[in-house]
Amino acid sequence: MRKDIILLGLAYVLSQFYRSFLSVLTIPLQRDLGATAEQLASASGLWFLFFAASQIPVGAMLDRIGPRRTAAWLLLAGGGGGAGMFVIATAPWHISVGMALLGIGCAPVLMAAYYILARDFPSSQFSVLAGLIVGIGTSGSIFSSLPLVWAVDLMGWRGTMAALSGLSIAAALGLLAIVRDPQRLVVENHGSLLDILKIPAMWALLPLMTVCYLPAGGFRGVWTGPYLNELYGADFDTVGVVALILGIAVVTGTLAYGPAERILRTRKWVIFGGSLIAAATCFVLIALPHDAMWRSVILIAVICFFSACYPLMISHGRAFFPPHLIGRGVTLMNLCGMLGVGGSQIITGRIHTAITEGGGAPAEAYNALFLFYGAALGIGLIAYLFAPDRTD
């Protein structure tokens, strides 16, 4: 592991933090800014949508100017500026702007690491190293749980976000100084996204790529706090503890998928089996009454664990990309994944509001959310049945 790969992995910790910290700040943001659950869900969705929209230019930038400048400049402007927006926020729309900027700033970090792995490392090592980087980075989901609660208690949420803005700027400057670009490829035709979409396997892979992370992204991104508070009256500290548990579930799931592929010698069926378990657990939560908080937490942790096949899905797709299209190929897959989560945040926010404002009980609203997640995974799995299995 080169030092630039390690630094990109550490920068990815910030990316994972920023996509999930809002669920823990729900209570203070509602209190201080008057933000509603739907507004915070939409703001969280904007992170994913702007992250996704950035993937197309990021893919072209990786192939043309390299990962060093692509990752460093976007993280500097978007990461530092987005966190800084929270510091001066006085209305809910300021949170939305901040989340959009953070999505742009975080967009190139993981893809820059994947680009370097795909170009400079043996293909047989890609899925394990990719999973390791995501495993390291997903610790950001842990830092955005109970440690974030402690930081807010110590410095307030504005002071905490000011510190994170400074940390993002420092990480970006470190990337600019340390990351090494792979040797430029000399090709007559740089290709385009259309060339990626001409690969038949993509049409079976992309639907599941779009939905595989929805439940984990949804609950770690925004719904942990509202779910626990509305159904069980949980306080700020309890939300932090549960967010920590779910973060650990995502980390361990991410780290487990790579070795499982090597042991079982299949990518497709490891991904299929894990996603099927996640979908089934969504329906179990619907069938059971919401009368035992820790039982529900354990089941949601199971969903988060088995929804962590994201890097293995990208590894599956990367096996079909020619060298000169690797940057655009992996960013296209990442675009689909983030677009799915971002759109689902907005959709689930509206589902929650429609049911609760229509007189429905909170349990009904969250059953509808679990139904949405389970059905989406089911549709993705049907398409994935037609994907060819390919390992390195």
Image (spheres, rainbow, N blue to C red):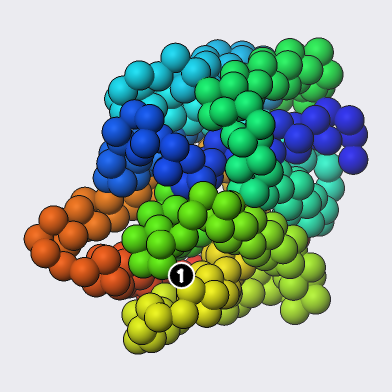
Front residue of 83/10: it is 83
Which quadrant would residue 392 be assigned to in this image? bottom right
Residue at figure coordinates x 54%, y 29% from the top left: 157
Q: Is residue 304 above or below residue 185?
A: below
Which quadrant would residue 155 be assigned to in this image? top right
- Taking 5 as reference, is 103 left or right? left
Asked if residue 89 can be seen in this view, the reply is: yes
Residue density around tag 1, few if under 14, some if 14–19, many if 20 or more, within 10 Å: many
Q: Is residue 352 above or below residue 177?
A: below
Q: Position of residue 274 (x, y in %)?
A: 58, 74
Which amino acid is tagged 1?
Tyr
Front residue of 133/252: it is 252
Q: How many marks?
A: 1
Q: Position of residue 142 (x, y in %)?
A: 67, 49
Q: In the structure shown, which secondary structural element does the residue marked by tag 1 occupy?
A: helix
Residue at figure coordinates x 34%, y 80% from the top left: 286
Q: Position of residue 151 (x, y in %)?
A: 66, 35
- Taking 244 as reference, is 258 left or right? right
- Residue under label 1: 384
Residue furthest left in the image: 358
